[in-house]
């Protein structure tokens, strides 16, 4: 298993998650966005729902009907 690389943004994401029901993290592919969320969820002992817009059906739903999404 690879070693987790701590990120400067971790504490900011935790603060935002405490104040908002949704936090969006965007960035290039394969930079550790999902890994960051998994790490934070484990540290907080919380189940965090993640949605990736890589899935064309989820992306289409988000675009055409954001309220349902």
Image (spheres, rainbow, N blue to C red):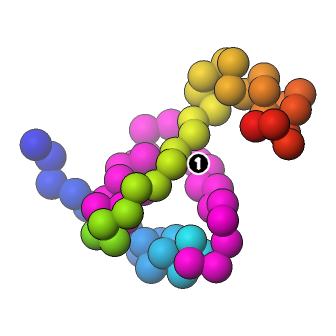
Quadrant of the rendered image containing residue 37: bottom left
Q: Residue 67 location in percent, x, y?
A: 85, 42
Residue 11 against residue 57 in the figure, above or below: below
Judged left or right of residue 53, residue 2 is left
Which residue appears farthest toward the top when viewing the image?
57
Task: Give the residues in magenta.
Answer: 18-42
Q: Compare residues 62 and 25 and report the one nearer the observer.
A: 62
Q: Residue 1 location in percent, x, y?
A: 10, 43
Q: Residue 55 location in percent, x, y?
A: 60, 22
Residue 69 against residue 46 in the figure, above or below: above
Q: Secondary structure at mark 1?
A: loop
| Residue 34 appears in view | yes
Residue at 51%, 48% (x, y): give it.
49
Q: Which residue is mark 1?
A: 27
Judged left or right of residue 44, residue 50 is right
Q: Compare residues 29 and 25 and report the one nearer the observer.
A: 25
Judged left or right of residue 47, residue 24 is right
Residue at 76%, 37% (x, y): give it.
69
Residue at 28%, 61% (x, y): give it.
42
Residue 60 against residue 16 in the figure, above or below: above
Q: Compare residues 9 and 67 and report the one nearer the observer.
A: 67
Q: Residue 17 location in percent, x, y?
A: 56, 71
Quadrant of the rendered image containing residue 5: bottom left
Judged left or right of residue 4, residue 19 is right
């Amino acid at each position: 298993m690879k070693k987790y690389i701590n990120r400067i943004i971790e504490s900011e994401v935790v603060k935002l998650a405490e104040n908002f029901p949704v936090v969006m993290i965007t960035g290039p592919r394969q930079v550790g966005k999902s890994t960051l969320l998994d790490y934070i969820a484990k540290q907080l002992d919380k189940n965090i729902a993640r949605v990736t817009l890589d899935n064309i059906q989820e992306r289409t739903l988000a675009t055409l009907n954001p309220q349902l999404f």
